[in-house]
Amino acid sequence: MKVIKTSKKLSSFCLSVSTCLLVFTGIAYTENSVTTVTDSSFPQSNQIMPPAADGGQDIVTFVSTETMFNGYGSSVNDYITNYEWDFDGDGQYDWESAESGFASHIYNAPGKYNVFFRVTDSQGNSSIDTVRVQVKLNND
């Protein structure tokens, strides 16, 4: 059975201020079926959990074209205080905002880039998601 596409989702459901249920759902799309796997856990009361970062789907774009990035974050501890993007994968974050993970970037050279999206919550905990970007010449 050949997996042709996968997706992931992390959800949190809070029962009280200090107790939340984290649910990870993975979906594998194969040539003939869709398989869903769910794993959930109850962390101990007052346990610090890292936030969840979701940089969105992988992207194919073109040189000199404005490319939109739509990142989201959630935290069971408190709230997200910082959203950051490292567009070229060099470890230096090129863009940041305290308001949202929506950003744009223009690539000047073709290639494949691992783009990192990081969220930080009000307790200083952070999480990173990777978005793969393929930049093509306009005539590709």
Image: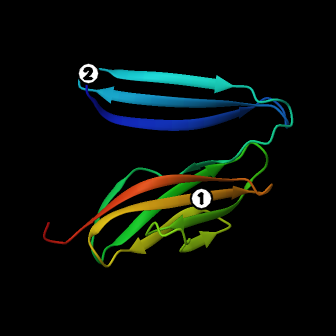
- Residue 131 picture location, percent across and down: 43, 55
Q: How is the image coloured?
A: rainbow
Q: Secondary structure at mark 1?
A: strand
Q: Quadrant of residue 84?
A: bottom right
Q: Quadrant of residue 112?
A: bottom left
* 132, above or below 49, in the image: below
Residue tagged 1 = 118
Instruction: Tell me: 4 left or right of 103.
Output: left
Instruction: Tell me: 1 left or right of 72.
Output: left
Residues at badges 2 and 1 in contact (C-beta under 8 Å)? Answer: no
* 26, above or below 88, in the image: above
Residue tagged 2 = 1
Residue 55 in sight here: no
Instruction: Identify which residue is drawn at 53% across, 68% down.
Output: 91
Q: Residue furthest left?
A: 139
Near mark 2 (Cα within 10 A), the count class, few <14, some 14-19 or many ≥20, is: few
Residue 16 in sight here: yes
Instruction: Identify which residue is drawn at 54% across, 59% down.
Output: 117
* 127, above or below 21, in the image: below
- Residue 96 picture location, percent across and down: 60, 71
Q: Secondary structure at mark 2?
A: loop
**Mark 2 or mark 1: whose residue is earlier in sequence:** 2
Q: Residue furthest front?
A: 90
> Gap in Å between the C-alphas at discs 2 and 1?
34 Å
- Residue 74 picture location, percent across and down: 66, 48
* Three-letter code, disc 2: Met
Instruction: Identify which residue is drawn at 81% across, 31% down.
Output: 19
In this figure, what is the number of numbered marks? Answer: 2
Near mark 1 (Cα within 10 A), the count class, few <14, some 14-19 or many ≥20, is: many
Instruction: Tell me: 104 left or right of 93.
Output: left
* Three-letter code, disc 1: Arg
